[in-house]
Amino acid sequence: MSKLKNDTFIRALLREPTPYTPVWLMRQAGRYLPEYNQTRARAGNFLALCKNPDLATEVTLQPLARYALDAAIVFSDILTIPDAMGLGLYFAEGEGPRFERPLREEWEIRDLTAPDPATHLRYVLDTVSQVRRSLAGSVPLIGFSGSPFTLACYMIEGRGSSDFATVKKMLYERPDLLHRILEINTQAVIAYLNAQIEAGAQAVMLFDTWGGMLSQAAYHEFSLAYLRRIIAGLTRAREGLRVPSIVFTKGGGGWLESIAATGCDAVGLDWTVDIGAARARVGMRVALQGNLDPAILLSSPQVVQREAAAILASYGKGSGHVFNLGHGISQHTPPENVAALIETVRTTSVAYH
Amino acid sequence: MSKLKNDTFIRALLREPTPYTPVWLMRQAGRYLPEYNQTRARAGNFLALCKNPDLATEVTLQPLARYALDAAIVFSDILTIPDAMGLGLYFAEGEGPRFERPLREEWEIRDLTAPDPATHLRYVLDTVSQVRRSLAGSVPLIGFSGSPFTLACYMIEGRGSSDFATVKKMLYERPDLLHRILEINTQAVIAYLNAQIEAGAQAVMLFDTWGGMLSQAAYHEFSLAYLRRIIAGLTRAREGLRVPSIVFTKGGGGWLESIAATGCDAVGLDWTVDIGAARARVGMRVALQGNLDPAILLSSPQVVQREAAAILASYGKGSGHVFNLGHGISQHTPPENVAALIETVRTTSVAYH
C-alpha cells in the first residue's frame, strides 16, 4: 500500500511533533453536503449506502475533495455489529436507528454470538480496502465501532431513548445478563476493528455514545472495563506503523483519567469540557481529540473562526491535539462554515507548533 | 407561623449536625402516585393544577402522607415566569412544555419585562402560603424557579429540544440579545423567589436543567454568572432563620467548584457524579444534594436499598448531605420502591451521624 504523504493525524495521536494541528470532523461525510445527499438518493437509503462499498467509498471521499482534512473515516454506522448478529437494523425515516428484533428474552441473550467480520461485515471491510486504495496515501483512514455498552443500549432498547430505562433496569436487576451481552459485544468489536485494520484502517476509534448517562460506578463496570479489554486486544501495528486508538465517551468529561488509563492513544472530548483543563489532567499520557460544539457551525464564518481559535489557544503549544467537533456535525451546517473551520485550524494552529 | 418540628433538611443544607440524612425527591408530587393522577384529572390538566392553589396544595402534600419525607416542595412548574411574561405556556398531551409565542423577533426581546410576582404569579404565592399553613411546621417548604438560562432555552426554542440549536445560534451570533433575555429573567427570578420566601418558603432551589449542554466558557458566561447574581439578590433570612439556597445544574459535574462559589448553600448533583468525590472537591464550602439515578427506582426494593446505601457510604460520615435523586422521579416508578428508598435512607444513614 502507498506510504502516507500526510501523517499529521497519526503523529498527533502519538504526541509526536507536527507542523500544524490536524483536523477531521465526526460525521464529515453526511447530509450537510449536497453531493452526499445525491449519492444517498442513488443508494435508496442510508443503510443501503452503508452496505454498498462503491457508494460508501464515494461518500467517504467527498468531504476530502472539498476540504483540506487530515484524515478520512470509513463511511459506516456504529450499529453494524448487532445488525450482523441478526437483530435487523433499520432506519425509520426522520428518526434514529431501530432494531426489528431487540433482545427481549433471556434465551436470546444466551444464544447471542459474535459475528465473523469476514462474512457478515464483509461490506465494511470491502469499503475500507477500496477507500484505502482510492486515498493512495494522501491521508490516513480511520476505522471505527460503537462501544460494547452503546451497542447494548440499542440491542436491548431496540431504538434510541432519552433515558434507556430498559437498559438500566437490566443493569441494576440482572447485571449478569448485561455482562453476557457486553462480553459478546467485546469479542465482536475486537474482531471487527482488527479486521478493519487488516483491510487497511490506519487508526481506530471507539464511539461510546451512551456511557455518559451512567453513574460513575456503573460506567466503570459496564462500559469502561470492556473498552479497556478492547484496547488490549487490538492489533497495535501494521505495515510497520503503529495503529493508534481513540476512545470517545460522550458525557465522559468527569472520567478522563480513567479513560486515558485504558491504554488508548487518544481521548475524544465532547464540547462541554475545556480542552486546556483536560490536557492538564491527562495530556501527559494521551492525545486529545475535539472539541468544538457542532452548534457553532450553524452560525457564521466569523464566529467559527473565533471559537476554533479559542480551542487552539486553550490546548496551547505542542503536539497531541487532533482538532474535531465535540459530536457529529449537524445536517443543517452550511458547508462554507466548515470551510472557515478547516482553514482557521490549518493557519492559526501553525503558531502552536 | 409554626415553628419547625423537623428541621433536618435545613440543618443539613447549612452543614449543621443532624441525627440522620434528610431526604426528599425531585418531582415527589407526580404521576407515579395514583392520588396525584386523580387530583390532576379533577383539575383538567397539568397547568390548571399548577394554577389552582387548593389543588396544588393537595398534591404538594400527597407524598408527605405516604412517606417520611423531610421537606415539601411547592407544586408548580419551572416555566411559570415566561408564562407570566405572556409567552403562553401550554402542554401538548404526552409531550413536554411549549410556548405559543416564543421570542422570535428582536423587538420582542427588547420589549420583554420581568413580571410582578404579586399579580402575575399570585397563584404560586397563594399555594406557598396555603401549603405552609397546612404543613403546620411538620417539615420545611421549598420554593423554586428555573434558572435564567433554562427559562431562556424554552422562551427562544418554544419547546424542549435535543440540541437547542436556535438558542445556541443566538448565543454565538447575537450574545447581546441572549444577555438581554437573561438580564430580564434574572430580575424576574430574584423577585419571584423572594416573593415565595415572603409567602413562606423556607429554602429555595434553582433548576438549571440545560446549563450542562453548554461549553465550559458559555456555561460560565450565560448561566453561572446569572445564578451568582440571583444568589446575591435573595432574602437571606426570614422569621429569624436562614433561608438556604440550592443550585442544580444537570450535567454540571465538571463545574462543581464554580457552582459552589456562587454563594449558594448547597449544590445539587446529577447521578453521573460520585458524591464522595464531589464532597472532596467542594464539601468544605457547600452541602450536597443527590444523587440516585431515578432509573434505579424502576427496579426492585432490594436494588434500591443497595444503591441508596452505596450513596450514603460514598458521602460518608458527617452532615451536609441531603439525599435526593439525580433528576426528577419517573412516572413509571412503583410507589413501593420509593417507600424502600425513604426507609433505607432514614435507617441506614443514622450510622453516619
Image (cartoon, coloured by chain):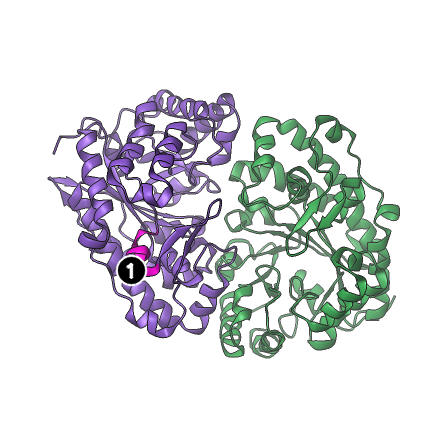
Chain colours: A green, B purple
Q: Residue at x 77, y 45 (%)?
A: A83
Q: Confirm whether the magenta stretch covers residue B234.
A: no
Instruction: Determine the image quadrant of residue A54.
Output: bottom right
Q: Confirm whether the magenta stretch covers residue B85.
A: yes
**Could you tell me residue B325's position as x and y percent?**
41, 36
**Could you tell me residue B61's position as x and y percent?**
28, 30
Mark 1 = which residue? B85
Q: Which residues are magenta?
A: B79-87
Residue B180 is left or right of residue B131, and the answer is right
* Mark 1 belongs to chain: B
Q: Residue at x 67, y 61 (%)?
A: A13
Q: Quick check: can you spot residue A76?
A: yes
Q: Quadrant of the N terminus of chain B?
A: top left
Q: Nearer the viewer, residue A287 or B278?
A: B278
Q: Nearer the viewer, residue A328 or A274?
A: A328
Instruction: Determine the image quadrant of residue B104.
Output: bottom left
Q: Residue at x 75, y 71 (%)?
A: A62
Position of B15 relative to A47 (above/below): above
Position of A185 relative to A170 (above/below): below
- Where disc 1 sits, the SS reads helix
| Magenta highlight: main SS | helix
